Image (cartoon, helix red, strand yellow):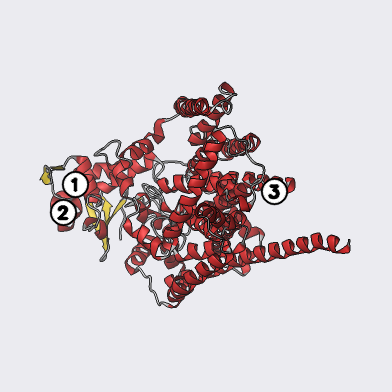
Amino acid sequence: MQEREGRPLAVLLQRVVKLFIGCLAAVTCGMIYAVYLSTYHERKFWFSSRQEMEREITFQGGSGLYYYYYKHMLFASSFEKGVYELTRDNRTVSGQTINAVEQLSLYPELLCSLLYKLSGSQDSIEPVYFYIGVVFGLQAVYVTALFVCSWVMSGTWVAGLLAVAWYIINRPDTTTVVYAIPLRDNWALPYFSCQVAALTSFLSNNISAATEMFCYLLMSVTTFTFIVMWEHGHYVLFVQGVVLLLLDCFDLIPARKTADIHKVYLSSLLLAYVLQYQRSALLSSPLLSLLVASLLARYLQQNMKMGPLVARLMKLVLHLYLVFTTGITFNYLVKVRPRHDFILKFLEVKFGLNSTTEFIPNLLLCEEGFQSPGQDLFLRLTQASVLPFYVLVMLVCLFSTMQAIYRRLSGERLMGGVQMEQGRIGERPEVIYHVFHTLLFGALAMLMKYLWTPYVCAFTAFGVCSPELWVTVFRWVRLKSVHPVVLGGGCVTCSISLQFFPRVLSELTEVQEFYDPDTVELMNWIKSHAPLAAVFAASPALLGTVKVCTGWPVTSLPLYTDLSLLQRSESTYQVYAMRSAEEVYKLLTAQQSSFVIVEEELCNQMSSVRGCRIKDLLDYANGHVVYDKGETYTFAKYGRFCHEIKMNYSPYTNYFTRVFWNRSYHVYRVNSVISFQY
């Protein structure tokens, strides 16, 4: 009798110990990754030895613009006053008063500045270190959530270790945090990772009511935060919503859980809409359209999951048709402004459905973040041993999932719990979710690989270390099982010994040097010579640096979701086109430009991607160059402006006066706009 009572106690104690060790390992991995990022960032930029301006220049690609607003909030007399000034910002874009909080999604900066003041860190931590420390801390949360995902699905925390190891090994393809810290996705994706981890546990059939409620609350908070932190968050959640729609259609998850997740989506969208000053993009969000369409289709097809196989297939096809046609119709009806139509045009060109000579869609296509991944991505994933195991795990899970779908459509009920010995890994809703999740996000890798590769690492680690997956395989081939921890441990050891430690140690010990004296000289000249009323025109990336380092007004911003700002950037880029001095002068004065900065890198740009040089895009859009059957025909009346203006020809000196130059930049005053003595 005592022996029987002791067994449950021993089992409970064993579970508690495993849970404690797993949680400790997850948190430790997150902390180690944050320390690694901080050390690598210091070694790469020699951050502690730089002056404030040089530190701000390290925020590349115009991302330093966000840090400017963080500084603004710190210098504001009060938090409320700072927010008020940002919602009526007339010192950033020339001739415009913008709501910077809404237009640039500045909630991370608002929260970070508030934490900095409330924590009393002013006397011990410099503002820039607090800022990047928060971002690195969020990256720790990111990898911890990936650890938990693999752990929950596989049942062993060894999978979490493998997921984190693969994530760090493939860091160039999993994150941009090292060189563009303030970007919105670096703030938002950790919350999405937590949301996916909570959703993974929520979909599981073998969780208690208390755990399910905790996961539901965590999922609600992280979904809302993700939408608020990143203006593209609702697009990512739309893809997730499509995955859940497929699971619901095939009756792979309980209808109750589907309804609960829809409530999370809807409440998060509505709260974000209120908090983000009634942002119209959320009303026309494809996620909202999908929710409305799913609800209507479900109401019209209440018996969709009943009947024989052929009838259910026909109902399923009709259901999907109703959902997507209703969603598209709803999205078209609720659109208030056509400002996002250029995004649709961009997607059409991206996926080969259309072609255009317009500058803006072609410029977006040439952005590195929107470039389709080349063979080098798959080569790196293969060398890190991720891709071969991913293909193996995906094939096993996908085949098992197809079997589960067939059983559902044939009328077999959803099993409340599946024993490992049954070899039915495709019966588990959380596994099926990740199968579709990685497949659909793999399609999106054409647009943003950083959404796909982290979950490839987590999903592959789960499969390698999952007892159920190997039991499924061995049942198919009628072999005896090998303990998965042995396999997982072997893979972890192999990855760490061959890839992890040597690469990390080389990155941390390699002496690197990032210094841009020409940009520093330009910023110092602006701060010491430009009048307070000056307005600067340049490429959006450089204007972001000008704004964060000097605070002077600019003509545009490095923001690729606002059509008006993209059109302003196109006008400024005309200095690299084959235009006359008078044409360029009119375009710049229309934006109230006082100075224009000509960048040697863009004027003499060399690019390995054919047709992606700024001057090529401009020539194509302006009709100055036509490509026909491999031949190039030029129809330009004038020479290239950025070349001609440096020759000091009289037509150019009548409109522009050079006031500063170095190896990288030439600054010209736009005559008659503002006059002063040097």
Residue under circle 3?
A: 207
Instruction: Name the kind of residue labelled 1 in the image.
Output: Ala
Q: Is residue 284 visible?
A: yes
The answer to which image quadrant residue 329 occupies is top left
- The x and y percentages for residue 72 are 52, 55
Between disc 3 and disc 2, whose residue precedes?
Answer: 3
Residue extending farthest top: 300
How far apart marks 2 and 1 lie (CA) works out to 9 Å
How far apart marks 1 and 3 lie (CA) works out to 70 Å
Q: Residues within 10 Å of mark 3 (few under 14, many from 20)?
A: few
- The x and y percentages for residue 222 are 60, 48
Residue under circle 1?
A: 581
Residue extending farthest right: 1
Query: Which structural element holds mark 3?
Result: loop
Instruction: Name the kind of residue labelled 2 in the image.
Output: Glu
372 up-or-down from 166: above or below: above
Residue extending farthest front: 478
Instruction: Name the kind of residue labelled 3 in the image.
Output: Ile
Query: Which structural element holds mark 2?
Result: helix
Q: Is label 2 in contact with label 1 (beta carbons under 8 Å)?
A: yes
Between disc 1 and disc 3, whose residue precedes?
Answer: 3
113 up-or-down from 524: above or below: above
Q: Residues within 10 Å of mark 1 (few under 14, many from 20)?
A: many
Between disc 2 and disc 1, whose residue precedes?
Answer: 1
Residue under circle 2?
A: 644
Q: Which mark is on residue 99?
A: none
Query: Which structural element holds mark 1?
Result: helix
